Image (cartoon, rainbow, N blue to C red):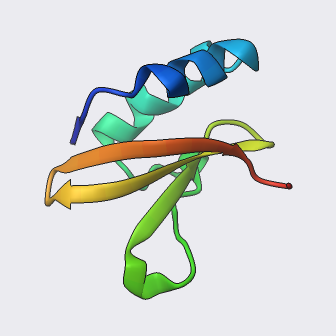
Amino acid sequence: MKILPVHREIIRYLQAHGLLKKFEKQIDFFVENPFHPSLDTELLEPKDLRIWSFRVDRKYRAIFIFRSFDTVEIIEINNHYK
C-alpha cells in the first residue's frame, strides 16, 4: 500500500497532540495491511462517499480515501469522540 505525502498541517496536528509516534506505528501496520485488526479500519457513513478511517489511538482516527487500488491519501486526523 502506498500513502501519499501527509499534509504539513496534519503533521503539526499530530505533533501538537503528541500523536506522531503512534501515527507512525499505525502507518507501518497500514502499509502492510490496511485492515490490520489494531487499526479498526472502517468505512464511514454515508458509505457511497467511500471515506474510510483507521485508529491512531483510542481517541483519534485518521480519515483517508483510496486514490487508486493501492494508493491512499490521509485527509484528516480527528478526535473520534467530538
For the point 44% across and 67% down, the residue is: 51
Of 8 and 33, nearer the camera is: 8
Q: Residue furthest left?
A: 69
Name the side, left or right, on which 66 lies relative to 37.
left
Tally of numbered discs: 0
Of 45 and 24, nearer the camera is: 45
- Report if residue 1 is visible in the image: yes
Q: Image quadrant for the N terminus?
A: top left
Percent across and percent down for residue 19 are: 68, 20
Task: Note whether 57 is above or below 20 in the view shown.
Answer: below
- The quarter of the picture where residue 29 lies is top left
Q: Image quadrant for the C terminus?
A: bottom right
For the point 55% across and 73% down, the residue is: 44
For the point 42% across and 52% down, the residue is: 64
Q: Residue furthest front?
A: 9
Q: Residue furthest right?
A: 82
Percent across and percent down for residue 18 are: 74, 14
- Report if residue 24 is visible in the image: no
- The quarter of the picture where residue 60 lies is top right
Name the side, left or right, on which 4 lies relative to 75.
left
For the point 76% across and 20% down, the residue is: 17
Task: Note whether 9 is above or below 52 in the view shown.
Answer: above
Percent across and percent down for residue 62 are: 55, 44
